[in-house]
Amino acid sequence: MYDLGSQLFPALARAGAALHGVTLPFQWLDIGRVTDYYQVVQQALRGEIRGFSLPGREVRPGVWMGLNVNANLDRCRIVPPVYIGSSATIEDGAELVGPTLIGSACHVGAGARIERSVLLEHTRVAGFAELSEKILSGRYCVGSDGTVIDGSLTDTSWLFADARSQPAPLSEAQQQLLRIAA
């Protein structure tokens, strides 16, 4: 890790290198840590970043979608702001509470509740999952505080996984827990 402001620029100045500045028509946001990335995505979804607009099309107030999204918004609960990326699937009964970003080619199961979270592209979330303030990929679940769960080291593929792989079959114990919860 090498920081531009506290390491590179001072090193260039000590070496006598010429430093030049330029005014750019956008807001610079440092996302050097995962927690910074989470905060910047939340700000972007809330419209708080000068010069940035969400891609896709606003299909309802505060709900943006990319191309080829498979979702019946009348059969899901969506609390804006929410962005759903291209080729994502949101099953009936899913709940998305903003600010939430669903990446392209994600699959959110019926009954899942995703709140103030970021699903990176190609992430599958099971229908009984409840996520709040997480960054989720097919392998990792990261809390907004930076806490990491590595799905390859735990038995979480039944809860979240890469959407391009087949869902893992539930064990008898997992099926029993679901029957009890229902």
Image (spheres, rainbow, N blue to C red):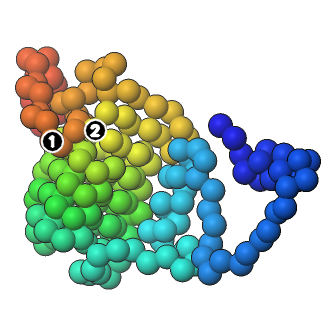
99 sits left or right of 94 in the view: right
Q: Position of residue 27 (x, y in %)?
A: 62, 72
Which image quarter: residue 70? bottom left
What residue is pinned by disc 1?
A: 164
Residue found at x 10% / y 59% = 92
Which residue is more in the foreground, 12 or 145? 12
- Amino acid of disc 1: Arg
Which image quarter: residue 102? bottom left
Residue found at x 51% / y 33% = 147
Q: Position of residue 40 (x, y in %)?
A: 54, 60
Residue found at x 21% / y 52% = 106
- Amino acid of disc 2: Gly
What residue is pinned by disc 2?
A: 138
Q: Position of residue 48 (x, y in %)?
A: 55, 74
Q: Quadrant of the C terminus?
A: top left
Which residue is more in the foreground, 143 or 165? 165
